[in-house]
Image: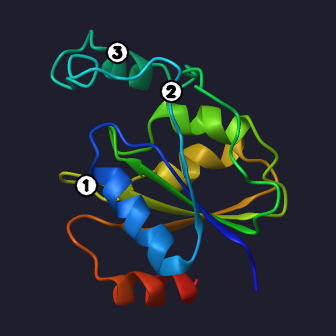
Amino acid sequence: MSKKLVAYFSAGGVTARAAKALAEAAGAGLYEIRPQIPYTAADLDWTDRRSRSSVEMNDRTFRPSLADHDAPVEDCDVIFLGFPIWWYTAPTVINTFLESYDFSGKTIILFATSGGSGLGRAAEDLRPSAKGAAIRDGKLLNGRQTPEALRIWADGL
């Protein structure tokens, strides 16, 4: 049986709730990806082209620093990687996370939360940051997911 980890970034708590439910249902460890400088409400104002998130997402090479580098990825075979969708893809802090560890030979399954779009081009955008890993699109985990549905999904991958 493979060892699993749910690693996630959550800006407003929605993705955190989904990640915790998935980790419990899948019998996986849980790790929060935290930027060194937390995002404020003003930072997340996507209608302001000068907000921190807007500036970062307009420069796909930008890599926010992480608060720590303690993710227990080396012993895991499968990593469920969660994030809110920003501009039809993953926030750049997810690239920072992927570039901070060796994911060679691991399977990374994406999940996301979104107010109105799907996973978009997240897998395509993240692959260069996780060389040697198999990155697979997963699903949106918006709203309440039953533990049984999450377990069946996680076990079926």
Asked if residue 100 lies left or right of residue 15, the reply is: right
Residue drawn 46% across the image and 90% down it = 152
> Which residue has dot 2 on it?
35
Choose mark 2 or mark 3, whichever is in front. 2
Q: Quadrant of the N terminus?
A: bottom right
Instruction: Say which label, 2 or 1, has the lower sequence index.
Output: 2
Amino acid type, label 3: Arg
Q: For the residue labelled by badge 2, is the local secondary structure a helix, a strand or a loop?
A: loop
CA separation in Å, label 1 and label 3: 21 Å
Closest to the camera, between mark 1 and mark 3, is 3
Q: Position of residue 86 (x, y in %)?
A: 34, 39
Three-letter amino acid code at the position of disc 2: Pro
Q: CA distance from mark 2 to mark 1?
A: 24 Å
Dot 3, how many residues are within 10 Å of its Cα: few (below 14), some (14-19), or many (20+)?
A: some
Identify the secondary structure beneath mark 3.
helix
Which quadrant: the C terminus? bottom right
The residue carrying mark 3 is: 52
Q: Say few, some or many: other residues with alpha carbon within 10 Å of mark 1 (under 14 / 14 to 19 / 20 or more).
A: some
Query: Residue at horizontal 21%, vertical 23%?
Result: 41
Instruction: Name the residue located 40 percent from the left edge and 81 percent from the top edge.
Output: 150
Q: Is residue 3 left or right of residue 44?
A: right
What is the x, y in percent for residue 51?
Answer: 27, 14
- Classify residue 131 as left or right of residue 12: right
Mark 1 and mark 3 residues within 8 Å of each other at the beta carbon: no
Indicate the position of residue 25 as horizontal and vertical percent values.
46, 79
